[in-house]
Image (cartoon, rainbow, N blue to C red):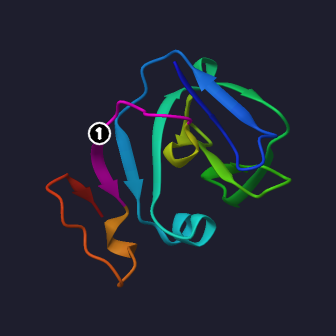
Amino acid sequence: MIKGSCLCGDVCFETVAEPSGASMCHCSQCRKQSGGIWASAQVRDVDLVITGSVRWFEATSLAKRGVCPRCGSFLFWKGTAEDTISFALGAVDGNTGLSVEKHIFTASKGDYYEIADNVPQED
C-alpha cells in the first residue's frame, strides 16, 4: 500500500494498486506549480482513495490539477479524457518502491539543469 498526504495533513491519499513507474514532468506548468520537476506515478481513478477537500485547477481543457486548499501542496494531475490519476511522489509517506521510467515534456525543461540519467525522454 502507498499512502501520502499534503504538507499540512488535511488531504490524504492511498492506493493498494500497483502504480506505474515514476514519471518526471519538465513542462512549464508543472515547474511553475511545483517549483521544479514534478515526480508522479499513476493508478486508475477507482484505485486511489482521497480524503479531505481538494481544490481542482484547470490550466488547460486537457487536464486538471489537485491541490490542498490550505497549504497549497500540488498532489494530483488528472487528464480530462483519462481513467487514471497521477499522484505526487514527493507527498508519499515512506518509500515508494518505484523507479523513474521516463522524463516527459523535456523540450520545455528549465535551462538550469541537465537530465543526466539514461531514462527515456519524451519531448
Q: Is residue 63 left or right of residue 11?
A: left
- Furthest-left residue in view? 118
- Which residue is located at x 58 percent, y 18 percent? 47
75, above or below 49, in the image: below
Residue 48 in the image: x percent, y percent? 62, 24
- Which residue is located at x 20 percent, y 52 percent? 120
- In the rendered image, the quadrant that contains the C terminus is bottom left
Residue 118 in the image: x percent, y percent? 13, 55
Give the quadrant of residue 32.
Answer: bottom right
Q: Give SS at disc 1.
A: loop
60, above or below 45, in the image: below
Q: Does the magenta stretch include residue 98?
A: yes
Q: In the image, which residues are magenta?
A: 93-104
- Which residue is located at x 70 percent, y 54 percent? 73
Q: Is residue 102 left or right of residue 2?
A: left
Along the line of sight, the residue nearer the viewer: 2 or 93: 93
Residue topped by disc 1 = 99
Q: Is residue 102 magenta?
A: yes
Q: Dot 1: few (<14), some (14–19), or many (≥20) neighbours within 10 Å?
A: few
Residue 51 in the image: x percent, y percent? 78, 28
Along the line of sight, the residue nearer the viewer: 57 or 70: 70
Along the line of sight, the residue nearer the viewer: 57 or 36: 36
12, above or below 48, in the image: below
Q: Is residue 101 left or right of residue 75?
A: left
Residue 18 in the image: x percent, y percent? 42, 20
Along the line of sight, the residue nearer the viewer: 91 or 23: 91
- Furthest-top residue in view? 16
Which amino acid type is shown beneath numbered disc 1? Answer: Ser
- Furthest-front residue in view? 94
